[in-house]
């Protein structure tokens, strides 16, 4: 999260479930719309793998039974998610052509290591760009091949038609939909309950002193449900640690909101206590990402 | 009747008893009997498997004694979905029209939308599913219930399929 904020990368949660992906202009997103009856992810992925084999016959690409596409049997170049409604469906997948690999790995690395929950564990896979193994593969060439293969597979003769996804006249309501998919309530407010258990390393620079404190926090629907900090009483009076915990209750598990809530509280102390409180707040906000 | 209603509410969590009773007084078209209706207690065991009504989208609804409808998905649906890993359910208080999308169940297959069988207001959501989404597969008619709602228009129930009609329906689509 902090890396994302620094790089000013927007976050959205999709309605098709599954894991987190990093998108930039080197990562092609393909969406296959079909009726519910015609929903067939393997067939769609076949369009992708056949198209790739046409433009680069030497490429070893294979769709797995988990609907990933692997290069040379172990580099993931595509992942899939989908949504079924009453009569229709969409299946979308990524295709790593030339994405920024270092941004991808730093942004998808969890910043908080003490998180426990019942959420489905994320299975990180070693990834690769197509251009790492087929450097001459041009973006436009890839698009053309996909269009041709799609037409061939589904018996169609459609041409590639550019559209602007943010065109409100073409897609009425898309602006509102985007806002909703990026809203805190949708991206974080539906988060399954999780626990944070970690050691906080506190420091008092002026006295060159430090201590460890244990943090236990429970977060439900993105809000702090409980917070306990075991801070040695000779570092900070117990009344201050417990009041600080109380200030956080009900707040979003978010450094901005927590910082705002804590600012008022910090003003009440001075000197050594103030210094140590500021350090504690800093460390806490870092845990929140 | 009232005593039985109390027992049924208790099994889903004591803390929900009073809110359910108050809400049903405001919204339910059915009234709780003011005196215990002893004639009904003999039928109590069959009420535990009270009639399910089904939609063509494989959701079921069961009318409880307090007049609310418990909603879930059928065995056919849970088998088709595969292992459910996440349940996206509505907030309590959400107003739903019949056939409105009220959430989605995520499985390996896809995120599959859920449609409201009736018009009404969500009064309870199965919080067990947050930690145990697999209950939808293991116990789709009992512990894997999804939500409870008021029944604003009881006539809508008449148009839904009973168990026999639903079984016929499944056989016809499987062919």
Image: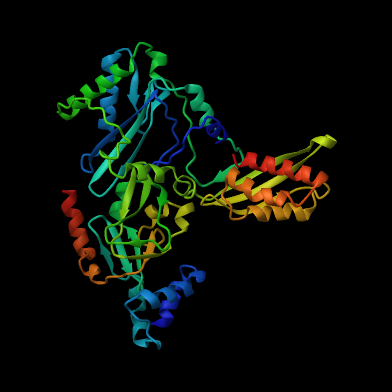
Please give the count of numbered marks on the rendered protein: 0
Q: Which residue does the image show at 18% across and 30% down from the upper left?
A: A154
The N terminus of chain B lies in quadrant:
bottom left
**Whole-percent x and y of residue A148?**
21, 22
* Residue, far top: A136
Q: Where, by quadrant of the figure, is residue B100 drawn?
A: bottom left
Coloured how?
rainbow
Residue A115 in sight in this render: yes
Residue A261 versus residue A107: which sits nearer the camera?
A: A261
Q: Looking at the picture, does residue A172 appear above or below residue A6?
A: below
Q: Which residue does the image show at 64% across and 39% down from the upper left?
A: A286
Q: Where, by quadrant of the figure, is residue A135 drawn?
A: top left
Q: In this view, does A7 lie to the left or right of B21?
A: right
Residue A73 versus residue B155: which sits nearer the camera?
A: B155
Q: Which residue does the image show at 67% across and 48% down from the upper left?
A: A263
**Whole-percent x and y of residue A67?**
34, 32
**Whole-percent x and y of residue B160?**
22, 64
* Residue, far bottom: B35
Residue A237 versus residue A67: which sits nearer the camera?
A: A237
Q: Looking at the picture, does residue A135 appear above or below residue B170?
A: above
Q: In this view, does B31 lie to the left or right of A149?
A: right
Q: In this view, does A142 lie to the left or right of A124?
A: left
**Whole-percent x and y of residue A189?**
49, 50
Q: Where, by quadrant of the figure, is residue B170 drawn?
A: bottom left
Q: Which residue does the image show at 78% across and 42% down from the upper left?
A: A275
Q: Looking at the picture, does residue B158 appear above or below residue A117?
A: below
């Amino acid at each position: 999260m902090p890396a994302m904020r620094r790089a000013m990368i927007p976050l959205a949660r999709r309605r098709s479930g599954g894991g987190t992906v990093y998108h930039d202009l080197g990562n092609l997103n393909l969406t296959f719309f079909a009726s519910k009856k015609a929903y067939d992810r393997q067939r769609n992925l076949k369009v992708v793998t056949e198209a790739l084999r046409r433009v680069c016959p030497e490429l070893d690409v294979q769709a797995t039974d988990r609907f990933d596409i692997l290069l040379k049997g172990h580099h993931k170049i595509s992942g899939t998610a989908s949504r079924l409604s009453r009569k229709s469906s969409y299946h979308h997948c990524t295709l790593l052509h030339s994405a920024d690999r270092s941004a991808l790995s730093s942004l998808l690395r969890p910043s908080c290591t003490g998180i426990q929950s019942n959420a489905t564990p994320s299975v990180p896979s070693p990834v690769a760009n197509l251009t790492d193994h087929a450097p001459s593969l041009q973006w436009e060439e890839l698009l053309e091949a996909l269009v041709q293969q799609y037409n061939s597979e589904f018996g169609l003769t459609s041409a590639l038609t550019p559209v602007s996804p943010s065109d409100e006249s073409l897609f009425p309501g898309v602006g509102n939909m985007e806002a909703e998919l990026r809203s805190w309530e949708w991206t974080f407010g539906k988060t399954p309950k999780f626990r944070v258990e970690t050691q906080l390393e506190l420091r008092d620079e002026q006295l060159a002193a430090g201590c460890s404190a244990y943090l236990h926090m429970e977060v439900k629907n993105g809000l702090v449900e409980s917070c306990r900090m075991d801070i040695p009483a000779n570092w900070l009076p117990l009344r201050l640690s417990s009041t600080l915990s109380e200030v956080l209750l009900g707040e979003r598990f978010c450094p901005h909101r927590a910082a705002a809530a804590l600012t008022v509280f910090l003003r009440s102390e001075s000197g050594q206590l103030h210094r140590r409180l500021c350090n504690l707040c800093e460390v806490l906000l870092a845990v929140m990402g | 009747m009232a005593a039985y209603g109390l027992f049924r509410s208790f099994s889903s969590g004591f803390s929900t008893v009073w809110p359910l009773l108050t809400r049903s007084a405001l919204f339910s078209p059915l009234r709780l009997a003011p005196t215990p209706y002893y004639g009904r207690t003999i039928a109590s065991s069959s009420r535990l498997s009270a009639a399910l009504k089904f939609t063509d989208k494989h959701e079921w609804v069961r009318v409880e004694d307090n007049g609310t409808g418990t909603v879930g998905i059928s065995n056919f649906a849970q088998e088709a979905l595969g292992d459910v890993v996440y349940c996206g359910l509505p907030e309590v208080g959400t107003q739903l029209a019949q056939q409105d999308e009220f959430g989605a169940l995520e499985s390996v297959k896809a995120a599959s939308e859920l449609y409201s069988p009736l018009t009404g207001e969500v009064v309870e959501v199965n919080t067990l599913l947050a930690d145990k989404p697999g209950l939808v597969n293991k116990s789709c008619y009992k512990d894997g219930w999804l939500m409870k709602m008021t029944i604003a228009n009881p006539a809508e129930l008449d148009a839904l399929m009973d168990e026999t009609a639903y079984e016929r329906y499944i056989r016809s689509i499987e062919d």
